[in-house]
Image (cartoon, coloured by chain):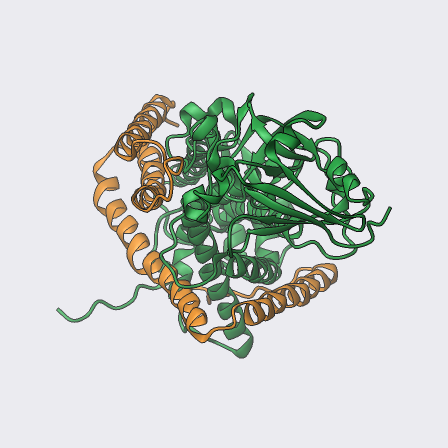
Amino acid sequence: MREYDATPASTSRGQAALRWVLWIGGAALLAFGVLTALTTVPSTSQRINVLLWLAGGVVVHDAVLVPLALLVGVVVLPRVPPSWRPALRGGLLALAVLGIVAVALVAGAATRANPSVVPQDVGAALALAGIVLVVGVLVGMFLGGARRPR
Amino acid sequence: MGLPRPPTPEAFRSPIHDERVVARVGVWLGIAFVVVFVTGLVSHFLQNPLPWMPLLPEPSWGYRVTQGVHVAAGIACLPLLLAKLYAVYPALFESPPVKSPAHALERASVALLVASSIFQLVTGLFNVFQWYPWAFSFVAVHYATAWVVIGSLVIHVGVKLPIIVRALRTRIVDGEIVDEGSVVPAGTLGVDVVAAAGMDGQLSSVPDGENVVLPVPDADGSAATRRGFLAGVAVTVLGLTALTVGQTVRPLAPLAVLAPRDPRVGPQGLPVNKTAAAAGVSETAVDPAWVLRLEGPGGTRELDRAALLAMDLHEAVLPIACVEGWSATARWEGVRVRDLVAMVGAQETADLAVESLQQGGSYSRSVLQHEYVAHDDTLLALRLDGEDLDVDHGFPARIIAPNRPGVLQTKWVARLSVIDGGAA
């Protein structure tokens, strides 16, 4: 097995120079962001809250969402015809996105400050989006099955 | 059974964990991030202009487009980011975790990019739904984080550039991604990989590393899997956009079941951000004793609503465009602001301080720069679509000017005062 290499070597001098420009430029942008945060978010309690949210997003994604997706893939995909798998994978991605948007939609409706915020019936909206998702997956499965096997 | 050991990157056998998939989703996501960043800066500097920056009232729909794109592209980033992170997920289990100081720095920059990207997209999404389950100032943190995201993204592209170039040089033939063997310089890839590439698509790889040959039983199936994954990502992005963008694009409003706003819903058919009750002006706004106080180098004037309605009224068809992405066009009727400043001896080159009846709050006061003051369509609006303004839209009078964030279109105006340089 070849050694895993996350920082590959440049393939030309021009590319090497461009990479240095990107590193230095990126570091400058990053430093400006950190300085801006330090000057505009002065209170320690707010900073701690920001750090918690930064870490929380990574934990929820890496330790919950992706393992769940992998688990569903390992359990479901081998049991269905290969032509259905791409549509089901896409459907799982769409389901994850719908889940995140649903959190915002439900919370936005629950805390709405006036009737023009999330004015729609949230249950009906999510049901409709779910139907769109299922129809999309079914169409994808049909198209996958219709493709001539090679 | 003991605790399960963490997997190795090679344990992830799906052909989706492949640099060619990663690079393609990465390009889409990178473009979207740049679009969101640039449109975000437009919004930031419209609200916090630097002294040398000219403000452009034309085109009147400019902010509506940039901020609509900002929110729509930000929402589209959600599936793109999930897909990108899924494709590179094996790299999380790199072993050993850190090999050198440079490698540690590289992994730290990736950690920062991932954390700040997820943070920015999720808090941005919650913000457009007006849900604030955190204890920090969204506007300040969103702005600072934008620079952190874009900076760590630029560093990341610098780190991965050779892989990105190599991965994007693969061609798509007959609907499948195949390797462009001829453009890969000898020595870039290991001999075994080049040989594998010649073996009709047997190439597979871990996402961030050198290519490794994995036992791939069905090469055509692998290509189809990668192609299908990219198609699934594209369809998800389009579907999500279709179900949300109607908050900005009125003809698509009936489709926008997942959007936080419907541009047709609200008092007088327009959404409201802050109501009179929320601003604490329910009584003062409808008080018949209300007068507009005008202050300028030529003195002070007070005008009640009847006096304003008796002036030369103008009509302007302008969008109200919110920082939260929704926007809606309406027909406003009122007095030109430049006519009002002329009454107190000021010229069109004057900046104007606008104060609301609202006491306190970040948007109870705004500055109307001279570029707007001079414009034909900049009004102290009294009427909306032929009716008196609803109190939630700023009755008795509000500012409406072209190409401007909605939060600056101050409602329930109590006082207009010329700031400086406006002496006639």
| Quarter of image, res B403 | top right
Quarter of the figure that contains the N terminus of chain B = bottom left
Residue found at x 52% / y 36%: B395
Q: In the visual, does B249 lie left or right of A76?
A: right
* Res. A71 in view: yes
Near-viewer residue (B176 or A136)? A136
- A126 to B213, vertically: above or below: above
Lateral position of residue A49 relative to residue B185, left or right? left
Residue A11 in percent (x, y) is at 66, 60
Residue at the right extreme, as displayed: B424
Question: In x, y percent, where is residue B94?
Answer: 41, 67
Residue at the image point whose x is 44% and y is 30% from the top: B267
Q: Based on the displayed image, in which of its 4 quarters is residue B406 positioned? A: top right
How many numbered badges does the structure rendering display?
A: 0
Of all chains in the rendering, the one displayed in orange is A
- Asked if A58 appears above or below A92 in the picture, the reply is below
Residue nearest the viewer, comparing B307 with A100: B307
Give the farthest residue toward the left: B1
Name of the residue lying farthest toward the bottom:
B101
Indicate the position of residue B202 as horizontal and vertical percent values.
Answer: 44, 46
| Residue B100 picture location, percent across and down | 51, 78
**Residue B179 in view:** no
- Residue name at image x 54 percent, y 55 percent: B362
Q: What tint does the image give chain B? A: green
Q: Is residue A126 left or right of residue B165?
A: left
**Residue nearest the observer in this picture, B314 or B83:** B314
